[in-house]
């Protein structure tokens, strides 16, 4: 199990060296991150994954969908409890949702004989369903005493152009799968489960590269063409758990959040027409890394540390002082770190003729005030990337720890 988790983590982190790539060929009879070498070797001898058979575990210390490798397809949904629905209805809903998620993640039909058949023939396909609670959930269910301060509203940022109708919500679901039909199947089943108890407030659809599309496992690219995810904290680092997950001994209003994490969700539109007019050399200076392979402009390969003090022959910093990778680096922000696990989106062409495309930026941390907030504050003050971005929607959700066998998600909040 440890071995399989390690494999998953390496893929998720994207900075996969030879050992990680070879690791993908390893499999196990069951459990998270089961990679069978059904598709045969790729150009460099690395076995490709068997997309359909990979199963993520519903039960566990943490919910699936946080350290799970990035999936090819994603749906984000926020729900508001229906007028008149309170704790009793919310409890019943989380029970239904958990039963459905558990079945679908195992590649089984949804409960109740009402399955739509959309995912017939497909295996679990790395399906994950991750549930979270928004600030407003606690007032609606009489649970304000158990609302962690970590859920307090994010501060306003000068670059915000947020649409409240596509922001926040009582409940949040993140669906990810390597198969688009499996993902949509889950979305329909969970939406039907909501019944009269909750209504969809907003929905967003995203994607990532399909597994097996590259000759070897690589860090993801975003729609600006950049290698995106290199600097993520590594699960092998001793402080990974402390930075990303609420600790076991959490007390007070946080006690039910042990093993959980806080998700900051931002719909970030990319102004791609402007970005694509920039010559490559300028694009690279905006980030501070090479576009081709994600290596720092100060040299080396993708995994080489940035040399933030290196001067060029022109007497200027090689990685400019407003480069995105410099400004967002933990060492520039008092150690602030988050696990970024995004999906790209493309919702067609906007009325002004520009692509309505960008990043569904999702980041995970034990405390947003030690992760997203200080970094976004800093970026807000002079990030070279900001002129090419527009933050259009925002959400902050408390994502409880994974359910133990026999438990449903959120039980420790709703029943203790
Ligand atoms: C507040 C947090 C961040 C937002 C919002 C954000 C938006 C954003 N970033 C990119 C592209 C890249 N980001 C990169 C690194 C990076 N970004 C953040 C934080 C936010 N980004 C962090 C913490 C880091 C890591 C810094 C480090 O550890 O050194 C990179 C470089 C490669 C990498 O490390 O991932 C790219 C490229 C886009 C396109 C974007 C909004 C759409
Ligand atoms: Fe970034």
Image (cartoon, grey):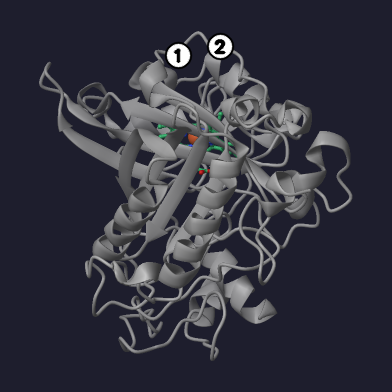
- What crowding class fits label 2: few (fewer than 14 Cα within 10 Å), some (14-19), or many (20 or more)? few
Specify whether residue 226 is in view.
no
Q: Is residue 156 left or right of residue 255?
A: left
The quarter holding residue 141 reads top right
Q: Could you say whether the residue bearing mark 1 is in a helix, strand or loop?
A: loop
Q: Is residue 283 left or right of residue 336?
A: left
Total numbered badges shown on the rendered structure: 2
The residue carrying mark 1 is 160
The residue carrying mark 2 is 156
> Is residue 236 depicted above or below 296 in this figure?
below
* Residue at image point 53% right, 62% down: 68
Q: CA distance from mark 2 to mark 1?
A: 7 Å
| Mark 1 beta carbon near ligand 1 (under 8 Å) | no
Image position, residue 27 (x, y; %): 52, 87
Image position, residue 294 (x, y; %): 45, 48
> Is residue 288 depicted above or below 259 in this figure?
above
- What crowding class fits label 1: few (fewer than 14 Cα within 10 Å), some (14-19), or many (20 or more)? some
Instruction: From the viewer's side, name the closer residue of 177 and 25.
Output: 177
Instruction: From the viewer's side, name the closer residue of 262 and 414.
Output: 414
* Residue at image point 29% right, 61% down: 185
> Is residue 62 depicted above or below 373 in this figure?
below
Image position, residue 115 (x, y; %): 28, 68
Q: Could you say whether the residue bearing mark 2 is in a helix, strand or loop?
A: loop
* Residue at image point 46% right, 82% down: 35
């Amino acid at each position: 199990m440890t071995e399989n988790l390690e494999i998953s983590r390496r893929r998720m982190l994207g900075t996969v060296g030879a050992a990680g790539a070879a690791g993908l060929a390893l499999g196990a009879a069951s459990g998270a991150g089961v990679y069978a070498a059904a598709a045969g070797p790729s150009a460099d001898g690395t076995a490709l994954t068997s997309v359909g058979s990979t199963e993520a575990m519903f039960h566990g210390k943490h919910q699936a969908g946080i350290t799970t490798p990035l999936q090819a397809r994603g749906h984000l949904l926020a729900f508001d409890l229906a007028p008149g629905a309170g704790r009793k209805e919310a409890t019943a809903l989380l029970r239904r949702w958990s039963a459905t998620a558990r079945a679908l993640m195992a590649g089984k039909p949804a409960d109740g004989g009402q399955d739509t058949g959309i995912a017939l023939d497909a295996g679990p396909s790395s399906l994950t369903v991750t549930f979270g609670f928004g600030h407003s959930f606690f007032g609606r269910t009489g649970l304000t005493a158990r609302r962690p301060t970590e859920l307090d509203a994010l501060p306003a940022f000068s670059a915000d152009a947020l649409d409240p109708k596509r922001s926040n919500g009582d409940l949040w679901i993140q669906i990810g799968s390597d198969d688009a039909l499996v993902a949509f199947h889950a979305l329909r089943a969970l939406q039907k489960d909501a019944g009269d108890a909750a209504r969809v407030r907003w929905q967003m659809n995203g994607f990532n590269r399909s597994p097996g599309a590259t000759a070897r496992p690589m860090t993801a690219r975003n729609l600006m063409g950049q290698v995106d995810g290199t600097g993520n904290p590594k699960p092998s680092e001793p402080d990974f758990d402390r930075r990303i997950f609420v600790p076991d001994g959490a007390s007070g209003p946080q006690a039910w959040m042990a093993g959980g994490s806080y998700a900051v969700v931002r719909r970030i539109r990319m102004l791609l027409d402007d970005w694509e007019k920039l010559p490559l050399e300028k694009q690279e200076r905006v980030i501070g890394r090479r576009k081709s392979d994600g290596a720092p402009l100060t040299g080396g390969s993708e995994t080489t540390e940035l040399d933030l003090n290196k001067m060029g022959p022109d007497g200027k910093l090689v990685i400019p002082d407003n480069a995105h990778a410099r400004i967002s680096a933990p060492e520039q922000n008092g150690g602030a770190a988050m696990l970024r696990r995004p999906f790209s989106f493309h919702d067609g062409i906007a009325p002004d003729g520009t692509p309505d495309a960008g990043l569904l930026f999702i980041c995970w941390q034990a405390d947003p005030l030690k992760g997203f907030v200080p970094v976004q504050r800093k970026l807000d003050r002079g990030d070279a990337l900001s002129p090419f971005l527009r933050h259009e929607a925002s959400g902050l959700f408390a994502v409880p720890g994974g359910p133990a066998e026999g438990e449903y998600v959120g039980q420790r909040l709703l029943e203790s």
